[in-house]
Image: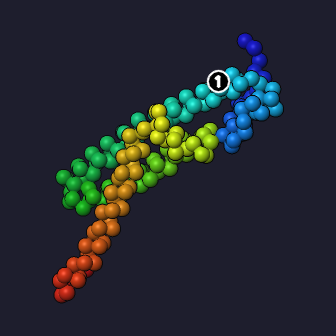
C-alpha cells in the first residue's frame, strides 16, 4: 500500500479553502494534487456528512417518540398539566436538533450554497422539518394564548386576565 501524500488535516484544510471559494484549479496547482483527488476527497467527506445526518435522524426518531410516549403516560397517570410540561423538553430538543443539523449540514459547503444543501437531493430531513414546524406552532400557540388572555379583559371588564 502506498504512503499518503497528505494528512487528514491537510485534506480538511484543502476542503475548507474550497468551501471559502478558492477555485478548484488554483487549489490543485498551489498544492500539487489533481482535480480527481479533490473530487474524491469531497465525495468521501460528503458521504461522511450524510452518514452523520442519517445517524442524527435515527437518534431524533427515538428521542421524539420517547418524549411523546412519556408525556402521554404522565398525562394519563398523573394530571394533564404534568404531561404538557414534558412538552417543553421536546421544544428544547427541537431547538437543539435544528442547531446540530445546521452545524453538520453546513460542513464543507460554501456559504452561498447552504440553503440549497438543506433543500436539495438528500437534504430533506423529516425531523429537521418537524422541529421547525413544532417550534413555529409552539410560538404561535403562546402568542395566540397571550393575545386571547389580553382580549378577555376587554370583552369581560370584570374578569381578571
Q: Which residue is mark 1?
A: 40
User: Seen from this angle, which residue lies furthest bottom?
Assistant: 158
Q: Is residue 47 left or right of residue 35?
A: left
Q: How is the image coloured?
A: rainbow
Q: Is residue 56 visible?
A: no
Few, some or many residues within 10 Å of mark 1 (<14, 14–19, 20+) = few
Q: Residue at x 73, y 39 (%)?
A: 22
Foreground of the two, 79 or 148: 148
Foreground of the two, 16 or 120: 120
Q: Residue at x 23, y 82 (%)?
A: 153
Q: Is residue 21 left or right of residue 71?
A: right
The image position of residue 67, as x and y in percent, is 33, 47
Q: Is residue 146 left or right of residue 16?
A: left
Q: Is residue 36 visible?
A: yes
Figure quadrant of the C terminus: bottom left
Figure quadrant of the N terminus: top right
The image position of residue 141, as x and y in percent, is 30, 63
Foreground of the two, 94 or 82: 94
Q: Residue at x 75, y 14 (%)?
A: 2
Q: Residue at x 23, y 50 (%)?
A: 72
The image position of residue 7, as x and y in percent, is 74, 29
Q: Quadrant of residue 31?
A: top right
User: Seen from this angle, which residue lies furthest top?
Assistant: 1
> Element at badge 1?
helix
Q: Is residue 107 above or below residue 78?
A: above
Amino acid at each position: 500500500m502506498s504512503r499518503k501524500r497528505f494528512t487528514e488535516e491537510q485534506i480538511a484544510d484543502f476542503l475548507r479553502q474550497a468551501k471559502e471559494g478558492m477555485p478548484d484549479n488554483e487549489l490543485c496547482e498551489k498544492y500539487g494534487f489533481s482535480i480527481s483527488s479533490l473530487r474524491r476527497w469531497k465525495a468521501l467527506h460528503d458521504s461522511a456528512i450524510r452518514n452523520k445526518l442519517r445517524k442524527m435522524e435515527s437518534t431524533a426518531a427515538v428521542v421524539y417518540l420517547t418524549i411523546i410516549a412519556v408525556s402521554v403516560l404522565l398525562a394519563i397517570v398523573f394530571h394533564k398539566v404534568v404531561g404538557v410540561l414534558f412538552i417543553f423538553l421536546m421544544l428544547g430538543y427541537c431547538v437543539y436538533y435544528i442547531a446540530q443539523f445546521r452545524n453538520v449540514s453546513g460542513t464543507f459547503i460554501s456559504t452561498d450554497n447552504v440553503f440549497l444543501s438543506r433543500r436539495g437531493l438528500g437534504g430533506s430531513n423529516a425531523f429537521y422539518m418537524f422541529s421547525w414546524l413544532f417550534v413555529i406552532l409552539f410560538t404561535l400557540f403562546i402568542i395566540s394564548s397571550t393575545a386571547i388572555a389580553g382580549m378577555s379583559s376587554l370583552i369581560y371588564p370584570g374578569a381578571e386576565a
